[in-house]
Amino acid sequence: MKQSSAFSLTNEIVEQVAEHENVDPVELPPLYDTVDVESLEALFENSHSDIRVQFSYIGYDVTVSDSDSDSIEVSQSGSQTSR
């Protein structure tokens, strides 16, 4: 996933979860309490192959993939919602 800024990847994850929760992103717990955001950002910044990372964040399953079509998927545990 080639982002204009590494910060935008983690920002997008938090924004999508906040949208599902109908809250402002600043009301959510820090993403860094769940996943090593620096490593996540570095992994996708320097990617030259297909990568898929999955983790749980406040009751949501988050999947970030870097393939032909970059994507972030956020779904409540047990459901499927793509962004």
Image (tube, rainbow, N blue to C red):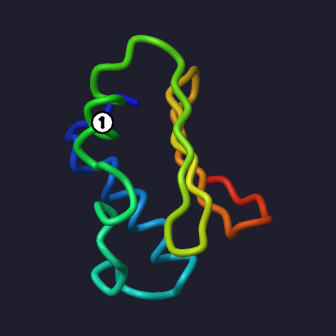
11 shown above or below 29: above
User: Which image quadrant for residue 59?
Assistant: bottom right
Task: Give the side of residue 19 with respect to residue 73, left or right.
Answer: left
Which quarter of the rendering shows the C terminus?
Answer: bottom right
Which residue carries the number 1 mark? 3
Report the residue at 59% width, 59% height from top.
74
Position of the N terminus by quadrant: top left
The amino acid sitting under disc 1 is Gln
Q: Which residue corresponds to the image point at 32% horizontal and 66% vertical from the top-left?
A: 33
Q: Please, is residue 51 above or below residue 62 in the view?
A: above
Q: Residue at x 37, y 80 (%)?
A: 28
Q: Which residue is drawn at the image coordinates 51% and 33% (left, top)?
A: 70
Q: In terms of secondary structure, where does tag 1 sit?
A: loop
Image coordinates for residue 29, horizontal then vertical, percent: 34, 78
- Up-down: is 42 above or below 23? above
Q: Taking 22 as reference, is 64 above or below it?
A: above
Q: Position of residue 20 (x, y in %)?
A: 57, 76
Q: How many marks?
A: 1
Crowd rating for badge 1 (residues with CA inside 10 Å; few <14, some 14–19, many 20+): few
